[in-house]
Image (tube, rainbow, N blue to C red):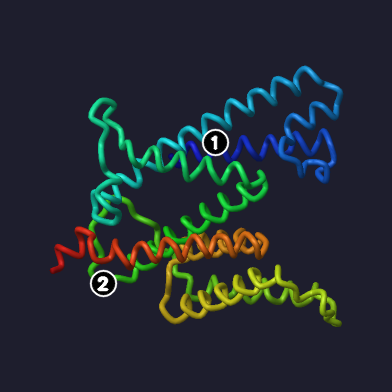
Amino acid sequence: MIYSLIICTVVYILLALVLTGMVPYTKLNVGDPLAMVFDERGMKFISGIVAVSAIIATASVLLVFQLGQPRIWMSMSRDGLLPKIFSRIHPKYGTPSFSTILTGIVVAVPALFLNLGEVLSLTSIGTLFAFVLVCGGVLVLQQRKDKPESKFKVPYINAQFIYPALVIAAIVLIVNKVPSHFTEDIWTKDTWPMAAFWVIAITMAVLAFTRKLSLLPILGMISCFYLMAQETHKVWMRFLIWLVIGLAIYFLYSYWNSKLAKEKE
């Protein structure tokens, strides 16, 4: 998986270099930049091939998501985090039938009313938040005295001085770039996500200094939080609503019915 990520990253960087060499980067803020570049250069036939390929590739990715989500719900149901109906297996096809149908409805119905930009933003912020939870989980596990045995290890690099120094340097650079006179237009309803990011970044700097946290998961968490902070307040409000719904399901059902909770009893 790591090798695949490295290869994909290198390919994306090379592709970005080629695209910015063919057209100004300011023109690439479109839904289909690769097809647009060839169309801009007069290569209509190549642009059409790229557009059709993009549709096929996008459909395959969405299909993988559609196949993965029902099985995640099935695993959660088997662990007691969701009702047993989510782990019901179809007698003929051997697939989680209820979870598959519910996933299709949950995905298809909102797609009828939301535009592409909103769907992409909600998908991005949800994925980034999952990465934040993973990084936070690594920090929690590394701080536990009774660390569970696992063959997957995250290298420990002491962030006690490195991360606070990075935060201080970033604050100094931003303060130097901000004009001395503040206007009311600077503080809008879309600035609070970035303000929340800085609160979290400074808090993590204090924790890193006092508790000697690991550097790699902190950098992963903060970088994902920074990307989340780029979204508008509307995206954040929708994300928070879904988060509250998820927490309500957890504390009203999952917390009390999970296998782990029953084992502790």
Q: Identify the residue at horizontal 67%, vertical 62% (top origin).
A: 232
Residue 148, relative to residue 143: is it above or below?
Answer: above
Depth check: give the residue in front, 251 or 56.
251
Residue in view at x 14 percent, y 63 percent: 263
| Quadrant of image for the C terminus | bottom left
Residue 103's spot in the image, x, y percent? 43, 42
Marks 2 and 1, how far apart at CA? 37 Å
Q: Nearer the viewer, residue 248 or 217?
A: 248
Mark 2 is surrounded, within 10 Å at the Cα level, by few (under 14), some (14 to 19) or many (20 or more) other residues, namely: few
Circle 2 SS class:
loop
Q: Do the residues under discs 2 and 1 have CB atoms within 8 angstroms?
A: no
Q: Which residue is depicted at the point 56% across and 56% down?
A: 125
Image quadrant assignment for residue 17: top right
Q: In the rendered structure, which amino acid carries the disc numbered 2?
A: Lys
Residue situated in front as seen by the camera: 136 or 6:
136
Quarter of the view holding residue 33: top right
Relative placement, left or right, of 123 versus 103 is right
Q: Residue furthest top?
A: 45
Q: Which residue is mark 1?
A: 7
Residue 148: x %, y % from top left: 24, 61
* 2 or 1: tag closer to the N-terminus: 1
Q: Which mark is residue 264?
A: none
User: Splitting the image into 4 quarters, where does residue 59 fall?
Assistant: top right
Residue type at mark 1: give it. Answer: Ile
Q: Is residue 39 above or below residue 194?
A: above
Q: Where is the N terminus found, in terms of image quarters? A: top left
Query: Secondary structure under badge 1?
Result: helix
Question: Would residue 104 be found to the left or right of residue 78 on screen?
Answer: right
Query: Residue 145, which numbered label?
Result: 2
Residue 116 image point, x, y percent: 66, 44
Percent position of residue 135, x then y = 44, 61
